[in-house]
Amino acid sequence: MKAINYPDYTFKLMVHQEIAESMVKGRENKTATMNQTNLIPFPKKELPEILFITTYPPRECGIATYTQDLKNAIQEKFGKTFSLKIGAVNTVDSDFQYPDEVKYCIQTDEINHFVQLANIINTDKNIAVIFLQHEFGLFGGENGNNILKLMAHLKKPIITTLHTVLPNPNSKLKKVVRQIADYSNTVIVMTNTSAALLQFDYGIAKQKIEVIPHGTHLVCSDTTTKNKIHLADRIILSTFGLLSDGKSIETAIEALPRIVKEFPNVIYLIIGKTHPEVLKREGERYRNSLYERVVELGLQNNVRFINRYLTLNELMDYLQRTKIYLFTSKDPNQAVSGTLAYAMANGCPVISTPIPHAKELVDGAGVNFDFQNAEQLADATIKLLHNPKLLKEMRLNALHKISPTSWQNAAIAHIDLTKSLLTKRKVDIKYQLPPISLDHIKRLTTKNGMIQFSRISTPDFNSGYTLDDNARALIAIAKHYELLRDSADLELITTYLDFIIFCQQEDGRFLNYVDFKGDFFSKNSSENLEDSNGRAVWALGEFSAYQDLFSPDLIEKANLALERALVSIGSFHSPRAIGFAIKGLYFYNLNKESLAVKNLIIDLADNLVSKFRGVSDKKWKWFENYLTYANSVLPEAMLYAAKSSGNEIYQKIAKSSFDFLLSIIFKNQQIKVVSNQGWHHKGGTVNSFGEQSIDVAYTILALKTFYKTFKEKEYQEKMETAFDWFLGKNHLHQIVYNPITGGCHDGLEKYNVNLNQGAESTVSYLMARLVFLEKGKLKASVRSYAKAPRKSVKLTTK
């Protein structure tokens, strides 16, 4: 025995060199050379560790891919909270060169490895939890019972994911699964059907079972990658995955003659290599049999084999070009299919055999057919191809049904479970800030302005434009340019400013609604547009404060528009219109120092003071008898009025009203803004659901203003808590911001996220995200700017 003494670590560990050598991952040999520091606990300053026991790439295996995707998602979202390591499961003849995150290798034919690894894990104080990925064929022994050797000796929390749950188990199988559950703190399955089987066929307690669906990759539904696949004139049907006879590809091939007769330009893509274990046993026997059947049926022009392991991007390209995805597995006990989930995540309507996963997912997004029934498959395919409208509906339904299962949401669910187990160890869960992206903002922006709505991430041009969205966009992109100096922002800024000016009428007021052709909607005359006018004043005023950043021509254009609007501002009645206007006038007057503007701010603030005194009491410190939308704007405006005038009454009301609002919308270290399904009335109860991104963003902006003024740490902490709402810290534990599209979902309902990514929510998210971006060193006297873009539809002044 050799004592290894590292004074910077928390304790010493005694190990046998020869025991660890075959377990710890090396670089040169299949049997790795031991780096003794791998057996020493991480220093206390290191992050707590999650150790995955699993197969892992480059091993080609569905569970290996699953683990890598889950690990990457957790790393992306919680990499500042946990360190993630892998204990890779190997077979006796495997020789993989693993990446750095693989800490241990386990030879399943070496039964002593399981006990030895358990001892090493137990002595590593930094390992917080074990994520065990279980499949019966992975660990050796009868029904995979070798894994029990590891689990029985582990003294760390174990979260076990069962990738297969077989119905009607015999006594031996039931015993193994129940022992796995007994050794686990929590058992994860991916479908409700599997959860029911565990409960009723295996007798496992319901409270020990968690359903976390198979993760999927987020995609942009408005993608241009389709052009990369040179099959533009073909109707693509596809299947992907590691090939084996269990996939029953021959069922689809047998259905093709009837399909091709109706649609001669159909091509069926069979994507993927033969499964490595199948290849070892029987070579390409199964693939060759499929080749032969294709030739016999004369389908050479309608079937293409893509015999390789595709990168994720390549796979997504194919799936996004797929008209219908065919899932033909002949195994009724296959609990879940990652390929099915990935296809739906790409908006593929699905025709599938009725495995449990498909029965739960496909309703509304496709059709189920009987196992190995080629006639039913042909009927379903022909029917859908004859009905493009139904296919479009199924595509949208697929995206709506599968979006909650994104890898980001799977990561949140796994970390929520982990946190619940680490009650004796304080772990501060930190969500990582996503990179800033303007992709969806650019997607929404035409030569005329920002389009109002999206269907998922595809702009809905029929929805037209609004002054509201373009005003917010001007504020957000100007701030983005101030912080990042991205020259591409300048064209956007000019577009949004021109749109605001286009909406201004001869009397200085603004209209709000413009159709895609550049005409004003009739509802401009039937709605109260005070709030929209207030937003325009806010945008113009805040933009004018950047007089040293943008060209004098742009600043002068904004100033003239705001000055034309001054005549109508004093007549505002809406508290929010008044609040927006105060913010705009405050920024406008930073450089102007106009006494008239200062007096206008005072008049507007006095109006709010009057409203506050007329309604508030000891328990209700607010400006109205109800809380509606954009509530944070009101106390923030009062604070800006105090900054402008020096009036302490304004500051006192600002703080008391804001603290009152925060006491309502922050509960249990989480923000829950006032519901748009029913406002919160004085003396009434708070409605729980219908949260909008814009309200969270406005709260973050106000928190920053109050923190800069009062330096209270609570405001800063609440700012971070509020932003985490976008990242998954909400009642659904789902992301609201989509990091792939750069868009933000439109709202949080009781049971689902509204997946549409409109202008209001997307720009509001950007406003909130920029709060957390520190301003870098700015170049002196930046004056360059872009000319206004040539408009696709000419907007004419009305």
Image: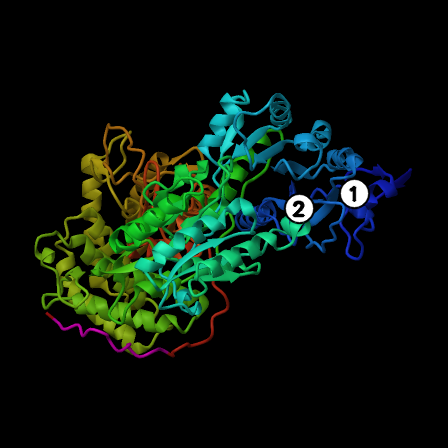
Instruction: Give residue 492's position: percent from left, percent from top.
Output: 32, 70
**Of residues 181 and 447, the one drawn nearer to the viewer in this rendering:** 181
Q: Is residue 702 visible?
A: no
For the residue pair 389 and 369, the one nearer the viewer reads as: 369
Position of the N terminus by quadrant: top right
Q: Are marks 1 and 2 in contact (CB under 8 Å)?
A: no
Residue behind mark 2: 85
Where is the C terminus found, in terms of image quarters?
bottom left
Instruction: Note whether residue 83 is visible.
Output: yes
> What type is the residue that disc 2 sits on?
Lys
Up/down of 200 relative to 348, above or below: above
Ranked by sequence position, the earlier of labels 1 and 2 is 1
Residue at image position (57%, 60%) is: 308
Q: x%, y% of residue 394?
A: 31, 49
Residue 794 in percent (x, y) is at 18, 75
Amino acid on which disc 1 is placed: Leu
Work out which residue is located at the far right of the displayed protein and give it: 1
For residue 33, above or below residue 202: below
Q: Quadrant of residue 376?
A: top left
Answer with the quarter of the image where residue 259 lies: bottom left
Residue 562 lies, in percent from the top left, at 21, 66
Residue at the extreme front of the image, as rendered: 296
Observer-nearest residue: 151 or 426? 151
Residues at marks 1 and 2, CA–CA distance in whole angstroms:
13 Å
* Residue annotated with mark 1: 39
What segment is highlighted magenta in the picture? Answer: 785-797
Q: Is residue 791 magenta?
A: yes
